[in-house]
Amino acid sequence: MTKPVFIALDFETVIAAKQFLTVFQQTTKPAVKVGMELFYAEGGYAFVRELKVAGFTVFLDLKMYDIPSTVQKAAVNVGKLGVDYVTVHAAGGARMLAGAVAGLRMGAQAAGHTTIPKALAITQLTSFSEEEMHTTQLVGVSLRESVVHLAKLAYQAGVAGTISSAYESDDIHAATAAEFLSITPGIRFAGDAVGDQSRVVTPARAAAMGANGIVVGRSITQAVDAVVAYTRALNELNGEDA
Ligand SMILES: O=C(O)c1cc(=O)[nH]c(=O)n1[C@@H]1O[C@H](COP(=O)(O)O)[C@@H](O)[C@H]1O
């Protein structure tokens, strides 16, 4: 199966996101990620619906994190949107994660969607370095151990996969199951500016490290030719141009 490249539509407005997507009119529709910036913009909710109606695979990245009942009820409403993937913070704990999974299923079924959104658990953000994680969270284990611990928790709670950097993908699979998804942001082409990320790899390295899919924002959205950049990421990830 072709591993997906999710283009992070990190735009300030729906108009800007729509403008960006016009370059993909003549190509197969890419998988897209709508995050907080765009979802909270005016018309963000309706835009997610439009993307689904237009046939895009949609990853709604809201990083839900609250008490279990609040997340479950929020997940019911998210499930009604009919998206394909949704993020929740693994640090919210097993009960919150199970609530998210249940809520997504209930919402999707209530709205008559045949596809139940897959919950993906955020482990440690790719913007964290080992040092920053320690100074921020005061955890007594390595970043890798923390990620694997949170991945196991998420797996046992019925979540479909994790978000982490590709550096942790193999360890996540070893600690959970081969089919448990490891989706990895923190992707840059060789030579690209790292920006606010810390744990960064190329699409080809992400594939070699066991990633099942990648999230790419600026390396595609700010490229001179977004279609070329997207195709390059897809090819590198799937071993056709590494
Ligand atoms: O959940 C995410 O998608 C996410 C998790 C994480 O640990 N790191 C991370 O960068 N992301 C998202 O992935 C995208 C990365 O964007 P670029 O750094 O521009 O490629 C952004 O939309 C982030 O919100």
Image (tube, rainbow, N blue to C red):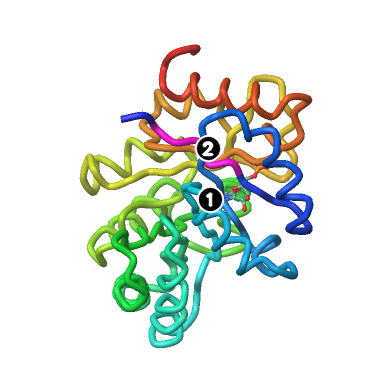
Q: Which residue is mark 2?
A: 29
Residue pictured at 63% horizontal, 24% vertical = 189
How many labels were placed on the picture? Answer: 2
Which image quarter holds the N terminus? Answer: top left
When the figure is inspected, residue 154 is found, relative to residue 40, above or below; the finding is above
Q: Residues within 10 Å of mark 1 (few under 14, many from 20)?
A: few
Pick the front one: 93 or 48: 48
Q: Which residue is mark 1?
A: 54
Q: Position of residue 42 (x, y in %)?
A: 74, 70
Pick the front one: 111 or 219: 111
Q: Nearer the viewer, mark 1 or mark 2?
A: 1
Side (left or right) of 77 relative to 18: left
Q: Which picture quadrant has residue 239? A: top left
Q: Position of residue 13 (x, y in %)?
A: 77, 58
Q: Are marks 1 and 2 in contact (CB under 8 Å)?
A: yes
Which residue is outermost to the top?
Answer: 241
Q: Amino acid at mark 2?
A: Lys
Residue pictured at 28% horizontal, 41% vertical = 173
Q: Position of residue 161 (x, y in %)?
A: 34, 52
